Image (cartoon, rainbow, N blue to C red):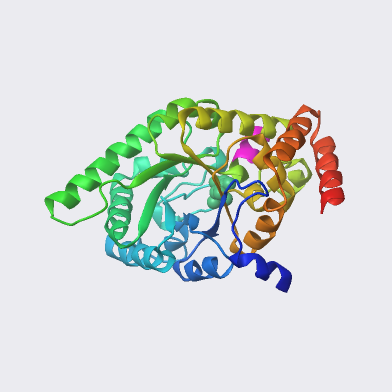
Amino acid sequence: YEKKLLDNIALKSETMDGHAVQLMGNIESAHEAKGVRNFGGEGIGLYRTEFLYLGVNCLPTENDLYVNFKNVAQAIQPYSVVIRTLDIGADKQLHHLDSETEANPALGLRGIRMSLTKPDVFISQLKAILRASLYGHVKILYPMITGVGEVREANHYLDRAKKELKDAQIPFDEKIAVGAMIETPSAAITVDLILAEVDFISIGTNDLVQYILAVDRINENVAHLYQPYHPSVLKILRQVFETAAAHGKHVAICGELGGDPMATFLLFGLGTVHELSMEPHSIPKVKKILRKVTLDEARKLADHAISLSTAEEVNQFITNEMRTRF
Ligand code: PEP
Ligand code: MG
């Protein structure tokens, strides 16, 4: 790893003109939590919990989950951890949840849809997260939301989980924050309604790009059409940022685009983003770029990028701009 990059770990993650952006790590297992701090990450912006359910013969118990989440919350203290509820289906299949083979799994029973059809599994996970919330700063994130109805339904199960814990006199953080992933066009278009029911949103660009462009994120035949810099993606991102700012809510990006140093300038210029969460080793690279940006410059760059017609044009423009600046 480049020593120069590691040198900036202790530096603040802010722009040249003093705008702070929290840089966080994405993890898929508890033992990765400590590594986030080694790269200068200020928290875990996405804990993908499905790996606790994959590769085992039976479902993890509430207690197994609780112990795991508690370890992560403690390891990352005083920073926060965003625990995403089960995002099974599509590219993350789970065989013991008796899922049927689907013709279009990316459009099938995945993410929150699966949780809402299996309340026992969902409530057990929610109770484990709530119990762990006493040991650090824990937030809940719902995946694959398409509209506010699903958020309300999920929150209804969250209330049930809280009530069950209260009845059993088990303590938890009563003010635990709840967020929705914005990773479908439908959620992005109706984000104003979703924002009214959550504390924060986290934009999952991996799926958002897949669904905006109708390009399977894991199909090599169409990999050349998977274009995060497509004008349609930029326009939807800008609209989401603007709506969230109008609601005064916290906005995170936890898809790969958030960890792409080529995109840092652009994302910051498109609107207010409070947090970028990424593979931990990308944190120093993104911080390096961020520290050379001013808001004015970034806005100008983003305004021009969003006026272009094709992903190729946007890519070429960004590449040139970054080359002349860095
Ligand atoms: C995303 O879709 O951008 C995301 C962060 O979630 P995952 O990659 O786990 O689907
Ligand atoms: Mg996703």
Between 234 and 142, which is closer to the camera in this rendering?
A: 234
User: Going by the image, does 6 lie left or right of 134?
Assistant: right
Residue at position x 54%, y 59% from top?
25
Q: Chief secondary structure of the magenta span?
A: helix
| Quarter the N terminus occupies | bottom right
Between 155 and 13, which is closer to the camera in this rendering?
A: 13
The span shown in magenta is 208-213
User: Going by the image, does 324 lie left or right of 165?
Assistant: right
Residue at position x 13%, y 55% from top?
169
Q: Is residue 203 magenta?
A: no
Between 228 and 265, which is closer to the camera in this rendering?
A: 265
Q: Residue 130: percent from the left, percent from the top?
A: 29, 53
Residue at position x 27%, y 58% from top?
131
Q: Residue 315: percent from the left, percent from the top?
A: 81, 42
| Quarter the C terminus occupies | bottom right
Residue at position x 49%, y 70% from top?
34
Q: Is residue 212 magenta?
A: yes
Question: Could you tell me if residue 52 is visible in this image?
Answer: yes
Give the vertical position of 55 relative to 222 (above or below). below
Q: Quadrant of residue 239?
A: top right
Q: How many marks?
A: 0
Question: Could you tell me if residue 103 is visible in this image?
Answer: no
Instruction: Please identify the residue farthest to the front as the structure is shown.
Output: 17
Q: Residue 41: percent from the left, percent from the top?
A: 55, 61
Give the vertical position of 287 relative to 89 (above or below). below
Give the vertical position of 275 relative to 248 (above or below). below
User: Going by the image, does 183 lie left or right of 170?
Assistant: right
